[in-house]
Amino acid sequence: MSREHDLDQRAAPAAARSSPIEHYDREAIQVHEYDPEAPAVARRVIELIAVACPGAAAEHVGSSAVSGLAGKGIVDLLLPTPAQDVAEVAEALVAAGFQRQTTADAFPPSRPMLQGAIRHRGKRYRLHVHVVPASSAELASMRGFRDALRADQGLRSGYVALKHDIVARGLTEPVDFTQAKRDFIAEVLRRLGLQSDDTVDR
């Protein structure tokens, strides 16, 4: 454990230090087989978010929300939030143990993504919590892409093949991986009549 992480932990609020949410580690992308425990992890984190942000209703999105779909192994949560409350909600999540992004490619404060990790049945799961303004078209895009994958085996197979191909080409940095998926996702959203957005399954 790094000295920087030790300092971060000492500076964190007491509530965050006692939280089950652990430090997030940024890693090179690998494609993992679907984990059937992911929905249970998502439900647990959704409950934690509801405690930290009363009235908040997060939902499970991303590849881990699609049964049988291989992916990055990250559990993504979507948290629709009134635009005027985004900063307050992000602050509440940080107080609950989640961490802000500190990388150059971080999401903007107007639409932040909080990070963390949690242990479930002896395994550590990395987490992304996307705090998206309730008026944003991105909500429909994230839900629509998830639901299209759930409904279409052929689409799931093509998406998994693309992921494996991207990693095989050495594009394992998160930003590179996301950019390499952009055209595939944009085409799916176009067919659904939804706005293309490269933050979908980022």
Image: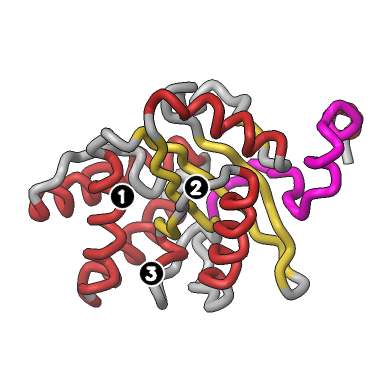
Q: Is residue 16 left or right of residue 156?
A: right
Q: Is residue 43 left or right of residue 65?
A: right
Q: Amino acid at mark 2?
A: Gly
Checking the image for residue 55, the label placed there is: 2
Range of residues picked out in magenta: 8-30
Element marked by disc 2: loop
Disc with the residue nearer the chain's start (1 vs 2) = 2
Given residues 55 and 157, the one toward you in this image is 55
Q: Quadrant of the C terminus?
A: top left
The residue at which mark 1 appears reads as 142
Task: Give the residue at x 46% y 28%.
Answer: 85
User: Is 153 drawn above or below residue 93 in the view shown?
Assistant: below
The span from disc 3 to disc 1 (Cα, nearest Å) is 12 Å
Q: Position of residue 149 (x, y in %)?
A: 27, 66
**Callouts 3 and 1 close, C-beta under 8 Å:** no
Q: Quadrant of residue 114?
A: top right
Q: Amino acid at mark 1?
A: Met
Question: Does 24 lie within the magenta span?
Answer: yes
